[in-house]
Amino acid sequence: MDLDQVLILAPEGAARTGLEEVFFRLGRRVVARDPEGAAEAPAEGDVIILDLRECDVDLRHLARALRADARPLMVVAEQPSPLLIELQNRPGGLALLTGAESDAGYRVALRVCEALSARELIRAGTAEALPLAG
């Protein structure tokens, strides 16, 4: 299972641009959106990346939509937040990063998200268990 397109939910700025560049270098198509005021996660993307590092607005309004979303969610955060607690145990899984990762670290996180996505498809009965390519 290959997660070709990533959806980055982050306010405009250097942190979001940096994430866009990393995932582009890793060969992914990138769509970026500002999460402020969004009531649900946009439909684009095979994996959602939520960047909380430079986000000074309360995004708990997205919690319900993100909890229900079956896509894997990668959260980039420097410290715990109430939103992280609300996103625990979501069906699509959750990977937490600090933002200080190298390209190799993000590559590993994408592999974890691929495994989470495959697990969710198997659980939903829409795919068979296949080993992930190395």
Image (cartoon, grey):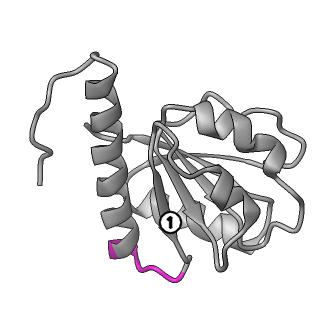
Q: Position of residue 33 (x, y in %)?
A: 73, 46
Picture residue at 48% right of the left edge, 36% below the top: 71
Q: Residue at x 64, y 79 (%)?
A: 78
Quadrant assignment, res 4: top left
Residue 74 shows in the view = yes
Tell me residue 31's x, y (percent): 61, 44
* Outermost residue to the top: 126
109 relative to 24 in the view: left or right: left
Compare residues 1 and 126 and report the one nearer the observer.
126
- The residue under the point 55% across, 77% down is 98
Residue stretch rendered in magenta on the structure? 100-104
Q: Is residue 57 shown above or below 130?
A: below
Give the quarter of the image for residue 3.
Answer: top left
Q: Around disc 1, counting alpha carbons within 10 Å, would you say few (fewer than 14), some (14 to 19), or many (20 or more)?
A: some
| Residue 29 placement (x, y as % from top left) | 48, 44
Quadrant, the N terminus:
top left
> Residue 62, relative to residue 129: is it above or below?
below
In the displayed image of the protein, which residue is found farthest to the bottom? 100
User: Residue at left 69%, top 33%?
Assistant: 65
Is residue 84 shown in magenta? Answer: no
Which quadrant, please, contains the C terminus? bottom left
In the image, is residue 133 above or below residue 55?
above
| Residue 41 visible in this rendered orientation of the protein | no
Task: Look at label 1 and name its amino acid.
Answer: Leu
Q: Nearer the viewer, residue 20 or 92?
A: 92
Q: Please name the predominant secondary structure of the magenta segment in the image.
A: loop
Task: Assign a secondary structure to mark 1.
Answer: strand
In front here: 103 or 74? Answer: 74
Residue bearing the label numbered 1: 96
- Residue 13 position, x and y percent, is 78, 68
